[in-house]
Amino acid sequence: MRVDVHYQQMLTKPRWFIGPHSYHYLARLSPRFLLFQALYTVALIFSSLPAAAADNSLHGALPMDQQLTSLEQLLPSRDVTKPPPHIDPVIWAAVVPDDNAVTPERIALGRKLYFDTRLSKDGTVACATCHDVSRGFTDQRPVSEGIGGKLGQRNAPTTLNAFLMQTMFLDGRAPTLEEQAKLPILNPIEMGQASPEDAVKAIADDPEYQQMFQQAYGRAPNYDDLARAVATFERTLVFLDAPFDRFAAGDANAISADAQKGWVLFNGKGRCMTCHPLNRSNPLGTDNRFHNVGVSARKQNFDELTTQALKVLAEKDSVEAIDRMALETQFSELGRFLVSKNQADIGAFKTLQLRNIALTPPYMHDGSMQTLWDVMDHYNRGGEANTFLDGGIEPLALTEEEINQLVALMFTLTDARFAEASQQQMQRQQKIAQERRPFREEALAFRRVLPFEQRVTGQESVTTGDNAQKAAAEGEKIIEQEKRDQEQGKNIENRPETQETK
Amino acid sequence: MARRPSVKSVETKYYEERQRLFDQLRGLDRRGFLKVSVAAVGAALTQGVQFAPHSFQPVRVAQAAEGTEAFRFAYISDSHLYDRKVNERFVRSLLRAVDDVNRMDPAPDFVFYGGDLAQLGRPEELELGAQILKNLKFPVRMMVGEHDWFLDMGEKWRALFGEPTYSFDHKGVHCVVLLSILEDDFWTARGMTPMERMQTVAGLDNGIQGRFKVGEEQRTWLQKDLASLADNTPLIIFSHSPLYKYYRAWNFWTEDADEVQALLKRFKNVVVIHGHTHQLLTNRIGNIYFHGMLSTAWPWPYAPEGLPELTVQMNRPDPFDPNDGCGDGACRVYTDGLVDKVYNLWNRNPVQVTRTYMVSNGKQELPAVPNLTSF
């Protein structure tokens, strides 16, 4: 598989391509250069093999011990039985279930479980694999990778501040963090345990766990308490201290002039606050509702899919069945409809929080957008026309300058503890956006062309679903390329050392 | 049949309904509560599991005994299209309705358009609408609304769609389409421009304009049209305004409704399908059964008085969802002329007002009542 990836890389970079129909191209190059290229390529393949092996066991996540170390730096110690700073005591009381009050013992147990790969069938995946401390508590990949390198259909939302969400998962199929924690462990392509009993068995022999469960819940290890503990740990991930909050509190210098203009656009021309209310009562910037904004329309014909899905759901309609449909099948693109069976929810996904949005690319439920500029382009053109498009989605006629201002605003929503990572993301995304803006469509944004006119007159859409899918696929290549660049960087760093040992 | 209580404000009505709900809840003992819960679960099941989103399959399949289905037709109504520069959302909504209808399974025999295709009767608005309706896979029957009419008194509409008053027979059912939104001349004496006239009519609750009427000329035509029909001929009348007196201040009203109803009195069953009100609306006056149509553009609140008793009210549409309370629908027409009326609400489960519900005066087959208060 690794070699396949490498082959793709060669395809994207013709100077490395050593295929039959490029012989005449090679003939023009000097033999010394060719030899160098060949050796370099072979060396690359070999040097990447051990790295690949290590990578596979981690699924791209930072090793758990390193994650735990960074976590300690992020979360200063405090009296956890009191509401966290930035959270109103009334809201805190509402989001903590009666049977799962926060205690230090429960947090400790939850933390241990969150980073424990033993919970997965093959011992390689923990919660922290896809909700990685070093990557904004997501995996920063289009869709998540579970045991055996299996890929799901959806982008991992962050666990940062997730405790304030009214429902969990992109289709809201779980009502609480406790219920949410139970599903990925049992999903065959995530952590793959066959049953709750199997999951408990994987850790129940550990005397440390026995003691911790006893201290936390006064019982032997069991699945419900396991989920409660993970949820309790996640309730400590409060990251609501952003430059934007200081601006909102009255410090006019806390965010740039651009971001301040972005805030005006956010509440006005951009229409963002309709679905992303961002205020003291709604610190996350989500309405907790489900909207078809057209992203899934680029992939699927909803008519056919809905008819098929209803047939499948008529036979199996448990939350586990929906979980599997959402992660393993094309029905994933139906979104909330799988849960509600309401036609208004076809292709609709939950409005996600805006907090720390800088840290959680790629964006949208399928990770099909690489940068916040892409996201703005998508909304600016009025989403993707489809029958079930949310009534509030309209072309916005935002200029480039206005898009930049809105993106600047979004970067002020990163918690102060991630300032550096946010800055890096800003530069990274800026660079990508300068090279490619696949969703940008000014004719649509400024209503020079309207999707219905194209339809009524029988013209092809300005950006067809195929083009957008191509753009998403290219986006995945960017991430792969970055990963390779990183690894190569490491290899180059390591090379002198290797030579020395030889 | 229309109940006429004293005038109450929307707020008073809201608080009264709230109080009624609380009183009912207090009155429930445990057994009663269980009954309500089971009913709710039952309703959820029929709505949820049997619900097929793109076919207007009836939620219940109970009433096969009396009368058999003759045919079904789809309806789209009150799209209020503006020029593209002003508003694009209503255009999108009409296209959505076109998609819905084209997807209907089983297919409808025809599509009925209920009037108010345009917002201000401008030629470009009407042309845009005509162009969109060409995307329908089934034959289209058109009716005119006041928004189509009062700019040029129907000139453009006639050029596009033909005469506004006509009748046709379909599978044993006699169908009549009326122009029910005529008004007495309020504009000449005031020296109004055509656009001023149009905008006056478009603003429902002003004191300048008159009330809608079918008018003597059309009533004479109707009488002649119906003259040769036997009393038991199934009859469907289409009118843009409701052919009864619902709420005068908003022109949810036909001034000569009583005279028109008199012409229909001798028939066994008459169904009137009307637009204009943008809401779930059901009425029965003796042998005449009235059904409103949903708008694709926006929903109206219920009038503060005069709401017919049989109406199962839709609760207050969600202001954050421009599609809520809007939609399209269909009618399953039975051999005796009565219909099951399906409201295909875009943001909710479909609501079906069945023939049995109407015949039993609302005692049987009560459609699922929303658990929120209406406005």
Image (tube, grey):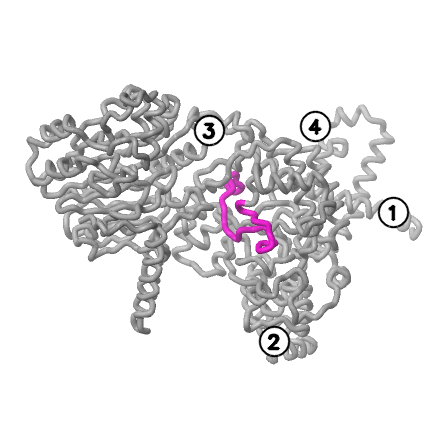
* Eye-nearest disc, 4 or 3: 3
Q: Position of residue B73 (x, y in %)?
A: 25, 38
What amino acid type is highlighted by mark number 1?
Arg
Q: Main secondary structure of the magenta part?
A: loop
Quarter location, residue A474: top right
Chain designation of label 3: B
Q: Check if mark 1's residue and mark 2's residue have beta carbons within 8 Å.
A: no
Lower sequence index among marks 4 and 2: 4
Q: Tell me which segment is drawn in magenta.
A: A274-299
Chain designation of label 4: A
Distance of mark 2 from mark 3, alpha carbons? Answer: 63 Å
Residue labelled with disc 2:
A221
Distance of mark 4 from mark 3, alpha carbons? Answer: 56 Å
Asked if residue A292 is among those painted magenta in the image, a careful observer would answer yes
Distance of mark 1 from mark 4, alpha carbons? Answer: 33 Å
Q: Residue B86 carries which label?
A: 3
Q: Is residue B113 left or right of residue A202?
A: left
Residue drawn at x 64%, y 36% is: A403
Residue labelled with disc 1:
A495
Camera-side residue of B182 and B72: B182
Q: Which mark is residue A21?
A: 4
10 Å neighbourhood of mark 1: few (<14), some, or many (≥20)? some
